[in-house]
Image: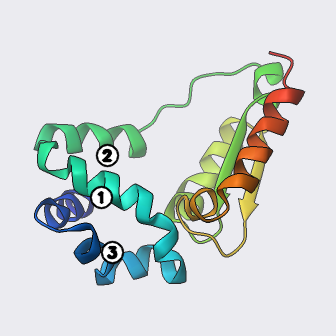
Amino acid sequence: MRFKFSTMIRIFRDKSIDEAMNMKFLKQFAGDKVNSLRPMIESLVAIAPYLTKNTIKNEVECCYTFDFPELSEEMQKCTYFFYGEDEKAYKTCYKHVKKAYPNANYRVEKGQGHITYACEFTNEYVKKLKNIINKSSL
């Protein structure tokens, strides 16, 4: 995974936002929702020149070699995970997260990729987060 992420960052280093938005791999990543990712891609294009190999290594290790800390049943009930049905994290991590935190709350958005729901339906997503916060007993 580090190779893929490093390659993506390297590709973004010398691109304008418009060039980055038209890249083939983004279509593979987000399907027909590429435009909803524009704010995220703008940020990646801006920070790509500053990311070192070590930064990328640490990011990938954090995402893919994560040890789940123990959470009490009460804390799990206050924990929420949002996935896009089409995102890799859902396909590869969901079962492990669900096993580690069986009492947590899970929401899977059909037809969505990695953070495409939050980007495409920002107001709706914010409302859901506000509802969660308002219901929380923490």
Q: Amino acid at mark 1?
A: Met
Where is residue 52 shown, x and y percent of the image?
12, 42
The local crowd at label 2, few if under 14, some if 14 to 19, many if 20 or more residues have their Cα within 10 Å, is some
- Say which mark, if any, is on residue 60: 2
Position of residue 67 in the picture relative to residue 131 (left or right): left
- Say which mark, if any, is on residue 29: none
- Say which mark, if any, is on residue 1: 1
Front residue of this view, candidates 71 and 118: 118
Position of residue 80 in the picture relative to residue 11 (left or right): right
Q: Answer above or below: position of 39 versus 80.
A: below
Q: Answer above or below: position of 46 versus 12.
A: above
- Tell me where residue 44 sits by quadrant: bottom left
Where is residue 103 shown, x and y percent of the image?
82, 35
Position of residue 37 in the picture relative to residue 7 (left or right): right
The type of colouring in the image is rainbow
Are dots 3 and 1 in contact, CB under 8 Å? no
Front residue of this view, candidates 23 and 89: 23
Badge 2 element: helix
Position of residue 118 in the picture relative to residue 22 (left or right): right
Q: CA distance from mark 3 to mark 2?
A: 23 Å
Q: Which residue appears at 42% of the width and 65% of the height? A: 38
The local crowd at label 3, few if under 14, some if 14 to 19, many if 20 or more residues have their Cα within 10 Å, is some
**Viewer-nearest of labels 3 and 1?**
3
Q: Amino acid at mark 3?
A: Met
Q: Amino acid at mark 2?
A: Val
Answer with mark 1 or mark 2, whichever residue precedes in sequence. 1
Answer with mark 3 or mark 1, whichever residue precedes in sequence. 1
**Viewer-nearest of labels 3 and 2?**
3
- Say which mark, if any, is on residue 21: 3
From the image, which quarter does the N terminus lie in? bottom left
Are dots 1 and 2 in contact, CB under 8 Å? yes
Badge 1 element: loop
